[in-house]
């Protein structure tokens, strides 16, 4: 049997559950432990999966059977747990958003570099076949030089109904629409073109009572290094809205929507497993076992947090912000 990476999942909530179910199908990783500060939850999930259950971080990080951790806890804990895990000699896959500040991202990168361990971020959309297809079409020049991208993520998420109240606490979540959705949606725009954002102008609005004190919708207009302009409109308070990307180039256009990719109005074949978590788990294990750098490495993903930080500064000042103002790539 091929070697399988031994994984402990930290956090035993909704998304962790999804990841653990996925690991059952993984060819190159296996679940060996789960840890949650809620001891009862950890025990129940450990029993469900037949693995060790911990309720404190030091114990799971001190377990010599654990080679890597996958972190699914509220945003505010991502940085400290990732740093502790790397320092304990574990590879890290941390859910999006990587962290709540760029400074924390840099501390995470430093810790994993010092330990010589992999740091990967769960940029799920990078593992979705339709987005991978759009990226490869752009790289092949299928629509010539890309000048304009428009992305919409109109969704509805009421954490009070789903039993996730921490998404309403700015200290834990940052800002829900920016950090929970934006960490994925801003990410694919620079990733599609391999072109970082240079400047951003953003505005947030508060449309409902659900997220009182946090903007629940955000619009941003960005200029990339390659000269392209991208626009992202996203919200967590719109029932039944669209989620799609429209990419305009010098020789045509691409539409990415509902699992399909159209080039100049024609559907193209999209291959690959729709299970983005399985794709992601596979890449993470390969990188840990073979000493490779993942696509969504800490270095690559920190730029997405830089964009979010710039979006907030721009909204606060009501003016465009250059990322070079504060994003001094280490
Ligand atoms: N990539 C995606 O598509 C996606 C989607 C949803 C959520 N997420 C991310 O996954 C993470 C988890 O979200 P969720 O919706 O599953 O949350 P959740 O509330 O369902 O679960 C969080 C779990 O973490 C535990 N926890 C809290 N603090 C902890 C700590 N310090 N140490 C260990 N355990 C701790 C809680 O007891 C809970 O069981 C978040 O960071 C979120 O942004 C990613």
Image: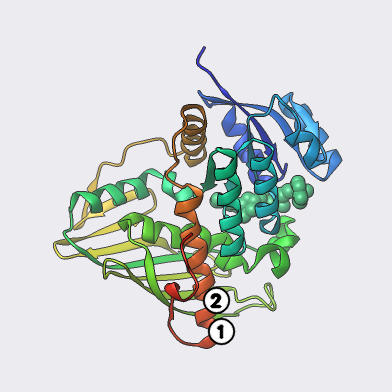
The image shows residue 250 at horizontal and vertical percentages of 15, 65
**How many numbered dots are placed on residues in this image?**
2
The image shows residue 93 at horizontal and vertical percentages of 58, 42
Q: Are marks 1 and 2 in contact (CB under 8 Å)?
A: yes
Q: Nearer the viewer, residue 42 or 330?
A: 330
**Residue sitting at 69 percent across and 59 percent down?**
76
Q: Residue furthest left?
A: 251
Instruction: Locate residue 145: give its quadrant.
Output: bottom left
Please tell me the numbered disc located at residue 225.
Answer: none
Instruction: Locate residue 238: give its quadrant.
Output: bottom right
**Residue sitting at 46 percent across and 36 percent down?**
279
**What residue is pinned by disc 1?**
316
Position of 151 relative to 285 (above/below): below
* Relative to 26, 225 lies left or right: left
Give neighbour class at mark 2: few <14, some 14-19, many 20+ (Cα, 10 Å): many
**What residue is pinned by disc 2?**
312
């Amino acid at each position: 049997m091929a070697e399988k990476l031994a994984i402990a999942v930290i956090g035993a909530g909704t998304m962790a559950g999804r990841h653990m179910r996925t690991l059952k199908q993984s060819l190159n990783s296996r679940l060996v432990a789960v840890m949650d500060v809620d001891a009862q939850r950890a025990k129940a999930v450990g029993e469900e999966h037949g693995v060790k259950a911990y309720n404190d971080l030091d114990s799971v990080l001190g377990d010599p059977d654990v080679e890597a951790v996958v972190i699914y806890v509220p945003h505010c804990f991502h940085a400290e747990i990732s740093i502790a895990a790397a320092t304990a000699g574990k590879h890290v896959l941390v859910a999006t958003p990587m962290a709540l500040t760029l400074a924390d991202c840099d501390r995470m990168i430093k810790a994993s570099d010092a330990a010589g361990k992999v740091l990967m971020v769960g940029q799920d959309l990078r593992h979705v076949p339709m987005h991978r297809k759009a990226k490869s079409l752009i790289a092949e020049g299928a629509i010539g030089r890309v000048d304009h991208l428009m992305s919409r993520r109109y969704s509805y998420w009421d954490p009070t109904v789903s039993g996730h109240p921490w998404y309403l606490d700015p200290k834990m979540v940052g800002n829900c629409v920016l950090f929970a959705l934006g960490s994925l949606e801003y990410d694919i725009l620079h990733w599609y073109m391999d072109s970082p954002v240079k400047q951003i102008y953003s505005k947030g609005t508060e449309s409902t009572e659900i997220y009182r004190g946090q903007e629940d919708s955000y619009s941003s207009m960005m200029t990339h290094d390659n000269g392209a302009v991208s626009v992202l409109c996203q919200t967590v308070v719109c029932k039944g809205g669209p989620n799609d990307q429209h990419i305009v180039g010098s020789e045509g256009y691409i539409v990415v929507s509902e699992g399909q990719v159209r080039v100049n109005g024609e559907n193209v074949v999209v291959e690959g497993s729709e299970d983005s978590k399985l794709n992601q788990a596979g890449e993470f294990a390969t990188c840990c076992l073979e000493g490779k750098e993942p696509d969504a490495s800490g270095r690559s993903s920190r730029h997405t947090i830089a964009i979010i930080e710039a979006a907030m500064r721009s909204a606060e000042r009501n003016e465009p912000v250059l990322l070079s103002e504060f994003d001094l790539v280490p």
